[in-house]
Amino acid sequence: MFHSQLHELMEMKMKKRLAIAIAASGLILAMGTPAIAGEKVASLRGAHDLVATSLKPIKAKVISREGGFERSYKQQPPMIPHKIDKYRITIKNNGCMKCHDEKHYKKERAPLVSESHFIARDGTKLDHISSRRYFCTQCHAPQKNAQPLVKNEFEGLK
Amino acid sequence: MTKGQKKGTLSILVIGMILGVVLWGGFNWTLELTNTEEFCISCHEMRDTPYEELQDTIHFTNRTGVRATCPDCHVPKEWVYKVIRKIKASNELYHHFVVKDVDTPEKFEAKRLELAQHVWKAMKDTDSRECRNCHDFDSMDFDRQEARAAERHQEAIDNNYTCIDCHKGIAHHLPEGYEPETPGGEGDGEED
């Protein structure tokens, strides 16, 4: 007898709790949902369609210009006025030096590497190119007739 | 000649002809089989280094889609020279199977200068014969070349330079310790 009474009481308690829980979640849903729906997630891309903006890039060939390019400012590393894809710079060999080193520049009518490139970190003059100047393409780059991605009003100092 | 003798001579002649065609054909067929890129790179020494390096160069991919494979540059086209080269290649087999002195990238690198010098010498001795199978000064349009290239090519014709004199390291990497030397421009280039 006593046992079944207790059981009934517990069942009633459970039902009450369940009802409260359902009511509470309903309230939260009712209050919360409109708030989320009203806030549209905006893409950083804006209204642009993902596919529409992916235009095929225009291909530009490396410019070959005799006499080289004029510098835009004093001490600008001169730009490379020819293709360089056939020359490799590796730990073993530097393809640029086939023409631009002291031994060959006259014959090849290539500009000689600047004297500054033979000076080591501590100021001593070396008879070979300094290791910190070894990777030519770190500063010197071939040029293409590419359109600037962003409008640029820079004018060279000359 | 009796009837039997006549028959015998005729059959020997026919068998000889058939045997000749089969053997000669078989010989040339085998020769050509060893004259393919596939054969060259069936050894890892060739596949892992020289072939790998070739793939970065203009002789492998280019604007017009013409490709030079290993034998195009390294095996003569003319039959006699081809067979001589094939006999010389037994030395390469000796080094592959017996000496094993280029079977790791490190060993290859250590021998690279020596190997390259062998090839350069062979090309110089033949006046770059294999290059000239495709590249001919007579069919070169200097107007389509860059100014510096056109000038140097004219100079090469005038002074009988050969292709390999300038064009080293164009299909494989240059070896460590290689000192560039331009024909007619050795030393400090003071000659004008």
Image (spheres, rainbow, N blue to C red):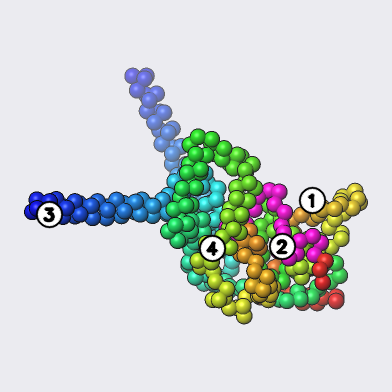
Q: Is residue A9 left or right of residue B25?
A: right
Query: On the image, numbered disc 1 is attached to which residue?
Result: A131
Residue extending farthest front:
B1
Front position among marks 3 and 1:
3
User: Which chain is indicated by disc 4?
Assistant: B
Identified by mark 2, the residue type is Thr
Identified by mark 4, the residue type is Arg
* Numbered mark located on residue B129 in the image: 4
Q: Quadrant of the C terminus of chain B?
A: bottom right
User: Which chain is indicated by disc 3?
Assistant: B
The Cα–Cα distance between marks 3 and 4, rounded to whole angstroms, is: 54 Å
Residues at badges 2 and 3 in contact (C-beta under 8 Å)?
Answer: no
User: What range of the chain is rendered magenta?
Assistant: B169-189
Query: Callout 3: helix, strand or loop?
Result: loop
In the rendered image, residue A69, in percent from the top left (x then y), is placed at 76, 74
Query: On the image, numbered disc 3 is attached to which residue?
Result: B1
The Cα–Cα distance between marks 4 and 1, rounded to whole angstroms, is: 39 Å
Badge 2 or badge 4: first in the primary sequence: 4
Front position among marks 2 and 3:
3
